């Protein structure tokens, strides 16, 4: 395939093609921003950094991405910024933050990462392709060029015929999905957050990898409270334990399996009275000739103030309805079994009630009636979805050690 389409592949720093018919425009909120507001003096750089910037600029000139401007041209000038990748390579960018204050947002829907990765199930070989310096292959309209001095993005990230590769912060194969520990390592080396901004930065990681962490909402609840308004930022023992627990879970997260939509699913749900909801989606697959049950994802959330006043059966019912809504991508049209430690849920669809809310919930889950089987499982053995909400502090510390 590569040999047949050789002209389409870039090798080295050779000139690239242009995307014609889709010229880039910069839409402004005003007729023209004041030029001095867009000008940025250069940052003080070391000699080594200046050499690297000059090297990148020369490469961009050779590849016809940028051009030299004359001294008599009226143009807003922004300072170049050098970004270094984890592999030591660098890319050249422009500091356009001031220009962004005058531009209209270009919003468009982004595909869900979990859905994209889920489609790799059973893949024997995986290929990842990307345009070399892709955004630089776009053509900027002539009357907008004066607003953009440097526009350089991207690095080489193509892989062909791989059985396993790194993509979107995950280590992906045709059978499983694991956390890319190189992404987490830098965060784990940082000290305990000292302010709200540092805490929000840290919480972004367990939020992104929440499918890998059992009862992540429970573990991070005390840390999220620190980011609320009118809350004094103080790292108590409980919050310190939660912080260490999250670090432990990120480094010891289980390897998730990719779903096979031709096989049935096992859904384990559990609700902790007045606390939160949790669930784990499993599937039994054949690995090395033996049947094994693996985790596809974990989901959890805290109860809202109004939900915390529900009775035990109503809370379990809420858990099932919420989980079916969140995991409809996997369960719609699929055969699956629901495991719960609440006996009343077995008779859920036949239950007669005058509670209008529960009647609405019964209607909401009717579409799953033919494919869903609810099975009772005793609380002591029902630990797939449970654990985080009712685990004592002593047990948490023992697990941590």
Image: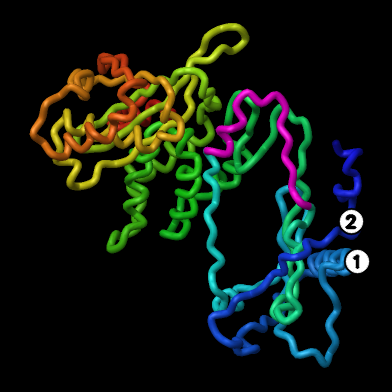
Q: Residue at image x 71%, y 65%?
A: 22
Give whichever of 40, 162 is nearer the camera: 162
Q: Nearer the viewer, residue 282 or 231?
A: 282
**Visible residue check, residue 152:** yes
Visible in this render: residue 88? no
Q: Is mark 2 on a helix, strand or loop?
A: loop
Q: Which disc is residue 334 wearing?
A: none
- Toward the viewer: 332 or 29? 332
Q: What is the quadrant of the N terminus in the image?
A: top right
- Residue 157: name its quadrant: top right
Asked if the residues shown at circle 2 and circle 1 are in contact, with their CB atoms under 8 angstroms apart, the answer is yes
Q: Give the range drawn in magenta.
A: 115-131
* CA neighbours of label 2 inside 10 A, class few (<14), some (14 to 19), many (20+): few
Q: Is residue 127 magenta?
A: yes
Residue occupying the far bottom of the picture: 72
Q: Quadrant of residue 266?
A: top left
Please name the residue shown 60% across and 89% down the image. 34
- In this rendering, position of residue 354 left or right of residue 383: left
Name the residue located 17 percent from the left edge and 35 percent from the top edge. Answer: 358
- Report x, y in % for residue 59: 87, 64
Residue 133, given in percent of the width and then of the height, sits at: 77, 57
Residue for point 48% across, 33% down: 212
Asked if residue 388 is among those painted magenta in the image, a careful observer would answer no
Tell me: 25 left or right of 16. Answer: left
Q: Where is residue 137 in the image (x, y as percent from the top left)?
A: 78, 61
Mark sitting earlier along the chain (2/1):
2
Residue 349, image x and y in percent?
21, 24
User: Helix, strand or loop at disc 1?
Assistant: helix
Residue under circle 1?
62
Q: Which residue is identified by label 2?
A: 13
Distance in Å between CA atoms under marks 2 and 1:
9 Å
């Amino acid at each position: 395939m590569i040999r047949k389409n050789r002209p389409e592949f870039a090798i080295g720093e050779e000139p690239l093609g242009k995307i014609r018919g889709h010229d880039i425009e910069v839409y402004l909120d005003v007729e023209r921003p004041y030029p001095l507001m867009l000008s940025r003096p250069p940052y003080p750089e070391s000699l080594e950094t200046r050499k690297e910037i000059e090297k990148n600029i020369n490469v961009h000139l050779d590849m016809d991405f940028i051009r030299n401007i004359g001294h008599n041209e009226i143009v807003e000038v922004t300072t170049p910024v050098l970004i270094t990748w984890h592999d030591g390579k660098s890319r050249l960018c422009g500091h356009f933050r001031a220009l962004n204050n005058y531009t209209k947002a270009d919003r468009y829907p982004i595909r869900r990462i979990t859905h994209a990765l889920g489609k790799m199930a059973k893949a024997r070989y995986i290929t990842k392709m990307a345009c070399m310096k892709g955004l630089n292959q776009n053509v900027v309209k002539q009357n907008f060029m004066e607003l953009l001095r440097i526009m350089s993005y991207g690095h080489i990230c193509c892989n062909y015929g791989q059985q396993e590769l790194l993509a979107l912060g995950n280590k992906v194969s045709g059978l499983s999905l694991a956390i890319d520990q190189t992404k987490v390592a830098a965060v784990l080396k940082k000290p305990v957050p000292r302010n709200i901004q540092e805490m929000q930065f840290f919480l972004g990681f367990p939020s992104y990898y929440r499918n890998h962490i059992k009862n992540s909402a429970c573990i991070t609840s005390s840390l999220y409270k620190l980011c609320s308004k009118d809350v004094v930022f103080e790292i108590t023992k409980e919050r310190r334990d939660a912080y260490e627990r999250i670090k432990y879970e990120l480094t010891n997260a289980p390897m998730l399996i990719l779903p096979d939509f031709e096989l049935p699913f096992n859904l384990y749900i559990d609700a902790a009275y007045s606390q939160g909801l949790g669930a784990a989606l499993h599937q039994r697959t054949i690995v090395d000739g033996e049947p094994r049950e693996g985790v596809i994802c974990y989901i959890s959330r805290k109860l809202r103030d109004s939900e915390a006043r529900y009775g035990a059966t109503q809370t379990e019912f809420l858990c099932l309805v919420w989980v079916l809504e969140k995991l409809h991508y996997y369960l719609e049209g699929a055969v699956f079994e629901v495991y719960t430690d609440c006996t009343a849920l077995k008779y859920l669809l036949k239950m007669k009630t005058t509670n209008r809310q529960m009647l609405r919930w019964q209607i909401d889950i009717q579409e799953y009636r033919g494919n869903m089987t609810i099975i009772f499982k005793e609380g002591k053995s029902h630990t797939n979805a449970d654990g985080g909400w009712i685990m004592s502090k002593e047990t948490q510390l023992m697990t941590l050690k």
